[in-house]
Image (cartoon, grey):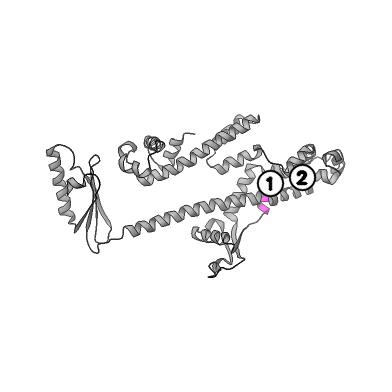
Amino acid sequence: MNIANTIATELNLKESSVVAAIALLDDGNTVPFIARYRKEVTGNLTDADLRKLEERLTYLRSLQERMDTVLASIEEQGLLTDELRATILEVKTLSELEDLYRPYKPKRKTRASIAKERGLQGLADYIKKGRAILPLNVEARKYINPEKGVNNEEEAIAGAKDIIAEEISDNPDYRAFGKRHIFFHGFLCSKEIAKDEKDTYANYASYREAVKTLPPHRLLAINRGEKEKCLRVSFEYEIEPFFNHIAYKYLYKNDFKDVLTDTINDALKRLILPSIETEVWNEKFEKAEDKSLEVFKANTRSLLLYPPLKDKRVLGFDPGIRTGCKWAMVNTSGIYESVGVSFITRGDKESIEREKGRLLEVLKRAKPDYIALGNGTASRELR
């Protein structure tokens, strides 16, 4: 993965600037330091650009590290094909990667793994093949083995169904379909199970809203209510479209439709749906948190930019030597009007005088009531 190129494309930045910023971050420099003192290295990346870059860098490096681990694990099992490798290398999110890895991930003991240990894989294959050369109960008798815990035909068939159910659950296509189905057609529901002193969650006592339109502030409120054990949260959606998506492969021209129908329903309700509901919730919650931070940032910005000097024009002046002196003008309402840079602290005497003349023109044109002078580098010289 070319991380620098990926970030540059996503954030619409120059790749050379991204490479330089990554090098500075890796050297231990902070975003504020880079934004203020290393502009010439990064091509004038703003602090906002750098924060987004740092966030994506951390995520993509985690994705790359996990990708390497997954590839090594599958290769160690001798199951890594060129096609699978190419598919894994093209994933964009950790969720997609984990869905691809699921069939190959070493598992703790499950009902399916126990059934395989009992030698029931052959019966599972027979059911999937779907040709009733022998009735299923007759075929199942071949797998009865009390020493391995298979005492009768029913136990043999049940174990085979567990194997098929886990196979369905591990299919990344079915999981991706399920997430899309819940996101676009599902509803998030909350029910009040207890009240706090102020009845804070009365609005969500019996609440239902489409997942795709649920606003972040409501989701955060519902999450808080669930954590405080005042609300019980659940998803509501039709299972039939999801069932049909899986059944298309398993039930077509199969003589054991009843057995496979039970198996698909078991895979959905026991293995797939609880898992993907959690993933959908986590994705929505992360986005809601990000949105809440954006709102908080915007509100804080508005508060900080509120003009402390009512009906006065103010020129903010940030002294500097190497990168010049930056200034910005705001009107009587605190609204930005203009900005510029003056190089009056370096150069020969003639260029400095010329820059002073330009700055004087700015002051005459802007007519500020006050000048706010920073107390950093070169502030003493400028007073």
In-front residue for pair 296/367: 296
Counting from the top left corner in percent of width and height, residue 196 is at: 56, 68
Q: Which residues are magenta?
A: 236-245
How far apart are the alpha carbons under marks 2 and 1?
15 Å
Residue 281 vertical placement versus 82 (above, below): below
Q: Quadrant of residue 40?
A: top left
Q: Which mark is residue 246?
A: 1
Q: Is residue 108 magenta?
A: no
In-front residue for pair 169/69: 69
Q: Residue under label 2, please give it.
A: 161
Counting from the top left corner in percent of width and height, residue 252 is at: 74, 44
Q: Amino acid at mark 2?
A: Lys
In-front residue for pair 170/229: 229
Q: Quadrant of residue 128?
A: top right
Does the rendering let one see residue 321? yes
Question: Could you tell me which residue is drawn at 84 percent across and 46 percent down?
Answer: 154
* Helix, strand or loop status at disc 1: helix
